[in-house]
Image (cartoon, coloured by chain):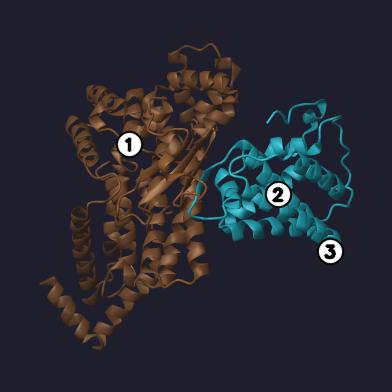
Amino acid sequence: MSVSKNSGNCSLLHPQHGAQKIYGFAGDCRSGSPLIDEIIAELLPRFDRATATLVVTQDPRERRFLLEAVVVAVLLFLIQRYCAGFLKGLGFDQMAEGHGRKATSLLTKIRSIRTQGDIASEKEETDRLVRELRKHPASELAKGSAERAVVENLVEAGATQEQAVSAAQQISESVASAK
Amino acid sequence: MIDEISYPALHQWLSTCRLLMRYHPRQGAEAASMVLGQSDRYRPGWNRVWQGSSAIHPELFVLVESGSGLTTPTLPTDVDPEKVHTVPDVPNLEFTHAWQLAQALAGQVVDLRLSEFPKHKVEQVMQTILLASKSDLYNVDKASLRKFVLAALTRMETAMNGTLNGKLLMDDFVGPVLDLIDAYLSFQIPGMVAAPLIAGLLSMQCNLPSLGPPALTPPPARKAAINHFVKVTQRMIQEREKLNVGAYYTLTYLAGLYSRAATALVSDALEVGDLTPEEQIELERIALNVDEQAAYSVSPAFTLPALFSSAQTVEWLKNRSSIRGASRGELSREHCVHPGLRAILENPIFELSNAEQVVQAYQAESASRAHMDVVETVRGQFGPIAPENRERILRGLVSLAIGYRMGEHSADDNSSGSRNE
């Protein structure tokens, strides 16, 4: 990853260290650097690799050593699931279903590649999706629905409830706090 | 109780012991060789690893590519088996750098004349490691397992008979499992032996009053035991971040045992069979989860502190960071470096520090963190017995005692009496 959460002056205002919650009112203060890069840079160092492996591994008898690019792809998938869940929580069922299908197709892609994948287009897609989400008003209901969507996917993949909730909360925080 | 980092040689020696006894001494020594870039057993492309005829998957196939890897029991159909490299066995422990280092460090620890690590104790640990290294790397010696199980069963039966006589001897009944964990923590028994034993004993504990083999364990009890180990392993990995050096590494070492015990329980369940395809996949996914937790958060933890002093570790990570183009933080997390040393590595104040300054800073970092008596936590918050199973055992023991008093279990009483004899 070449991105850094400290790139750009806006990092000085990183809301993770403050109380500001951002859904629907944060402008993108970074020029030319996608929002998703910041979210990924924030999540990547602390996201549990075992959880990422569970998402990637289709045959549980296999053991993978994940390249960072694959972990990024897993994060993109989970963020997409998060956004779809968020939209569903707001009542945009049709839109949520469409994005849910896209997330599923990304998962298929991640699982079908052995060790590396081209994720540039998925990154752009997820960036658009996060920006779309942020146009909507803040809603605890939608946030809860978004986190549940992530938790359900992770538990289905074999994560414990605690592990899944922790991952969902990390995604929630990072999506909310990115500027 | 001293924090091991107060004596750098002690910390390094204990780290070599953890490295070598976490699973099998030769495997630990090989892990160290790989970190040092001195192992050429695996080659780029597909490799075949022989696991032993009694393993669920006698052969495993490992794909090694630049910066990535895949291990699978099934060779993909598009790969020519003739072109698969067969991985040679790991070398004898005596020939390895890790063992030679452990020996030199053991001498230094003896010279420290610490009351907790007298000469005879240090020598005994070294002999145990050497002896354990002679055992088969892939198959646990059934005879030594049997010896342990029989001794444990005798103690459990004694406790059960005591219960029949009106005393509720719960602690005695579960004692053998706790003693086994103590033996692992004090390097008297390697993880390769301890994990299946613990799995077996935890299963047999739930088979009251017969104490029959693990195959007879009710599936819900086995599942509770597996889930408990997975959760406790995860909790330990989170909890260690707040702890001083000694507690951090001891807890990580214990997490290694619990993760292995969880996979041993899953193997038992798969071997017993009688599972729906959904149940089988669920169990395999649990095993995958706990295996991966251990692979990322436990296995790498012991190698650097075993091979290097704290100042050497900092230098090694700085060099690797330059070579790989990875951040120091990323690398130190990858190697599960203690948060105190991680802080030193990332703090520019220490950029030009000498070895002594690094050691002192590390000791201060460690002292600022909480201590935990890990042996004690095995009897408390990180105990091996699932709460549901503890209830189950307690209910079993109580009903035996009540049954005896009401004269309803004369047959059991007689059979237990004969066990006692």
Q: Which chain is brown?
A: B
Amino acid residing under circle 2: Phe
Image height of A104 relative to B21, above or below: below
- Count of numbered circles on the image: 3
Res. B117 visible in picture:
yes
Q: Residue B367 at what x, y percent from top left?
A: 46, 30
Q: CA distance from mark 3 to mark 1?
A: 56 Å
Q: Which mark is residue B266?
A: none
Residue position marked by numbered label 2 in the rendering: A77
Residue position marked by numbered label 3 in the rendering: A93
Nearest-to-viewer mark from 3 and 1:
1
Q: Residue B23 at what x, y percent from top left?
A: 33, 43
Res. A91 visible in picture:
no
Image height of B105 relative to B25, above or below: above
Residue position marked by numbered label 1 in the rendering: B88
Q: Residues within 10 Å of mark 1 (few under 14, many from 20)?
A: few
Amino acid residing under circle 1: Pro
Q: Secondary structure at mark 1?
A: loop
Q: Are marks 3 and 1 on the same chain?
A: no
Give me the residue at 40% from left, 45% from top: B256
Disc 1: host chain:
B
Give me the residue at 26% from left, 88% from top: B408
Residue B83 placement, left or right of A16: left
| Quadrant occupied by the C terminus of chain B | bottom left
B60 or B374, nearer to the observer:
B60
Q: Tell me the quarter of the picture where residue B397 sits.
A: bottom left
Q: Secondary structure at mark 2?
A: helix
Q: Which chain is cyan?
A: A
Q: CA distance from mark 2 to mark 1?
A: 39 Å
Amino acid residing under circle 3: Asp
Nearest-to-viewer mark from 2 and 1:
1
